[in-house]
Image (cartoon, rainbow, N blue to C red):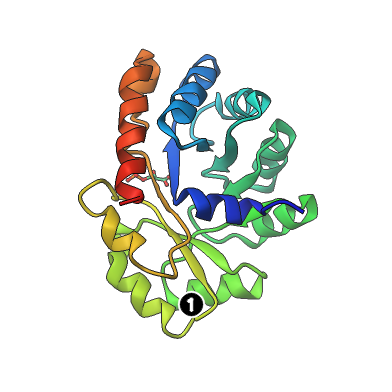
Amino acid sequence: AGPTVLERLAAHRLVPVVVLDDAKDADGLGSALVAGGLPVAEVTFRTAAAADAIRALRDRGDVLVGAGTVLTPDQVDAAVAAGADYVVSPGTSRAVVERCAEHGVLALPGAVTATEVQAALELGVTTVKFFPAGTSGGSKAIAALAAPFGGVRFVPTGGIGPANLDEYLALGCVAAVGGSWMVPRDLVRAGDLEAVRNLVADAVALATD
Ligand code: 3PG
């Protein structure tokens, strides 16, 4: 068997979180991600284009594609039908996690407190999105949570950028770090793929320092 989706995310260390206004932009975004050395995307269900964008990225065959901002079981179904490799939620929903399990797709629900981490563990989840990272205590909070929850891994996202990426990646319990800074919505919409590629390449360079 090849690496799991989680292992692939952890190997890349970074998860670009993207909001696509038009699914037509997805293929160009995929090219910029691949050219920048980070063939990973979390496409958020914050726009009507999400499912079609996931399908377009998935059809390329060279990008690990997640669905983000998944709030309902119906959105899980739509994400999986579009070919999503994993499903991310801002918080922990039993209904969403259980639907992911039915589909056999990795769920990364959000958790930022001890109670939320325990709730995720009860659902069989051992890797959580730590969102919104910056306003939830940042890397210090993750380090503190890692003490009682030794087997839990975190994907901090929200308020992270080049200036504070290091403090998160330095933690052994951090599987990968998510963020939108390398795929700005306006640049993607404008089709400025060269700028996106450069931001992606800069982020990869920072993460591999
Ligand atoms: C997310 O959905 O994960 C966040 O919107 C990403 O947060 P950021 O824009 O602060 O990176």
Classify the position of ligand 1 by quadrant: top left, top right, bottom left or bottom right: top left
Residue identified by numbered label 1? 115
Q: Is residue 117 above or below residue 38?
A: below
Taking the spot 78% from the left edge, 49% from the top edge, the residue there is 103
* Residue 60 left/right relative to 45: right
Residue 200 position within the rendered picture, expressed as x and y whole percent measured from the top left: 36, 34
| Numbered disc 1: secondary structure | helix
Residue 175 position within the rendered picture, expressed as x and y whole percent measured from the top left: 48, 60
Q: Is residue 189 above or below residue 152?
A: above
Classify mark 1: residues with Cα within 10 Å, few (<14), some (14-19) or many (20+). Answer: few
- Report the number of numbered marks: 1
Taking the spot 36% from the left edge, 68% from the top edge, the residue there is 171
Residue flagged by tag 1: what amino acid is it? Thr
Q: Identify which residue, 174 or 119, lies in the foreground.
A: 174
Residue 14 position within the rendered picture, expressed as x and y whole percent measured from the top left: 43, 47
- Camera sees residue 70: yes
Q: Residue furthest left?
A: 163
Taking the spot 59% from the left edge, 27% from the top edge, the residue there is 57
Q: Is residue 150 above or below residue 128?
A: below
Q: Identify which residue, 153 or 117, lies in the foreground.
A: 153
